[in-house]
Image (spheres, rainbow, N blue to C red):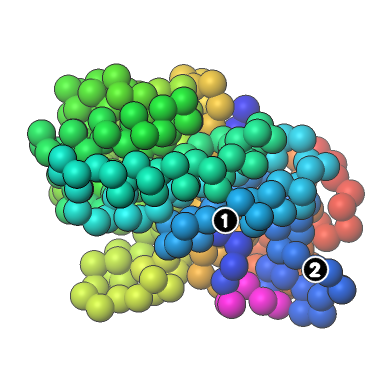
Amino acid sequence: MIRVGPAGWSYPDWEGVVYPRHKPTGFHPLPYLARFLDCIEVNSSFYAMPRAEHTERWVRHVADRDDFRFAVKLLQDFTHGAHPGQDTGDWEAKAAHFREAIDPIRRARKLGALLVQFPIQFIHGPTEVRRLGHLAKLFAGYPLVLEVRHASWFEPPARSMVGGLGYSLAHIDLPESWNHPPAWHPPSGRVGYLRLHGRNAQQWFRSGAGRDDRYDYLYDERELDALARKARRLAGETDTTYVVTNNHFGGQAVANAIELKALLGGEQQTAPPELLDRFPRLARVARADGQQRLF
């Protein structure tokens, strides 16, 4: 099975584009998005420790969507900070807190992946391998997905090591560079994870570019066709596959996610009316009234 959804749901620039201009009382973006897509990546958990009362609420919001899944991004303290070395007490306490916080999602059987994402400066080596091993022990039994952005991790011995530690190695789409991952690599685990960052090379490599600049990209139809083929190939070699659109700026992630769902499922999709207004080409694969037909 292939599930498609965006990375995150709380963006000011989605107001009036993805979400209604005039919201009804009690509106929450999560169940609204779940009407159109079947997974979402939680990225707030990367910036701050999540809270169980929040994850419980998220689960309730999608309780009527049996096939809906969450991917949760691991707290950046584990991936972007220094390893504690021999004094691991702080990490162990934080890991226990994190596990407790996301446990409502896991208990509800809606945890599709725990995304462990490192920056490009994380290059394959003994110290880095030890860190991965430590994290694998702290989160043993979780559906671990590893996103690494340096090409050194994609040599056969490194891929084998990653799989041996219990990680599924993410496939990522981003601007080309000599030290970026290859376009394709054999899966290393049971979870397929295709994460789309966009291909805005001018902004990606620009010193001082902000988050919105780097992820400001709309995949065109030719690119989406190729990505759909990659997702199908990945799904053929894994138990379940997630396609996560991280080109979030201006609602582009949701537009591309709906287009990919149409390509992968062969059915016309439904889409938020405001999104159809902003991206007229969506009318080729989606309508606002909820009626579906083969195309």
In this rendering, is residue 29 above or below 159? below
Give the residue type that dot 2 points to: Phe
Mark in front: 1 vs 2: 1
Q: Does the stretch in magenta take in 148?
A: no
Q: Is 216 or 65 nearer to us in this picture?
A: 65
Give the residue type that dot 1 points to: Arg
Residue 27: which disc?
A: 2
Q: Give the labeled residue for mark 1.
A: 51
The percent position of residue 119, horizontal first and vertical second, equals: 26, 53
Residue depicted at x 46% and y 25%: 141
Q: Does the stretch in magenta take in 13?
A: yes
Q: Is 33 or 247 nearer to us in this picture?
A: 33
Query: Hey, which quadrant is residue 205 in on the image?
Result: bottom left
In this rendering, is residue 3 above or below 279? above
Q: Is 165 or 87 nearer to us in this picture?
A: 87
C-alpha distance separating marks 1 and 2: 21 Å
* Quadrant showing the C terminus: top right
Please indicate whether residue 101 sits to the left or right of residue 234 in the image.
Answer: right
Give neighbour class at mark 2: few <14, some 14-19, many 20+ (Cα, 10 Å): few
Residue 60: which disc?
A: none
Residue depicted at x 59% and y 77%: 12
Residue lying farthest to the left in this orientation: 126
Q: Which residues are magenta?
A: 12-16
Circle 2: element type = loop
* Quadrant showing the N terminus: top right
Residue depicted at x 36% and y 24%: 166
The percent position of residue 27, horizontal first and vertical second, equals: 80, 68
The chief SS type of the magenta part is helix
Please state the total of marks drawn on the protein image.
2
The percent position of residue 43, horizontal first and vertical second, equals: 49, 57
Residue depicted at x 69% and y 40%: 68
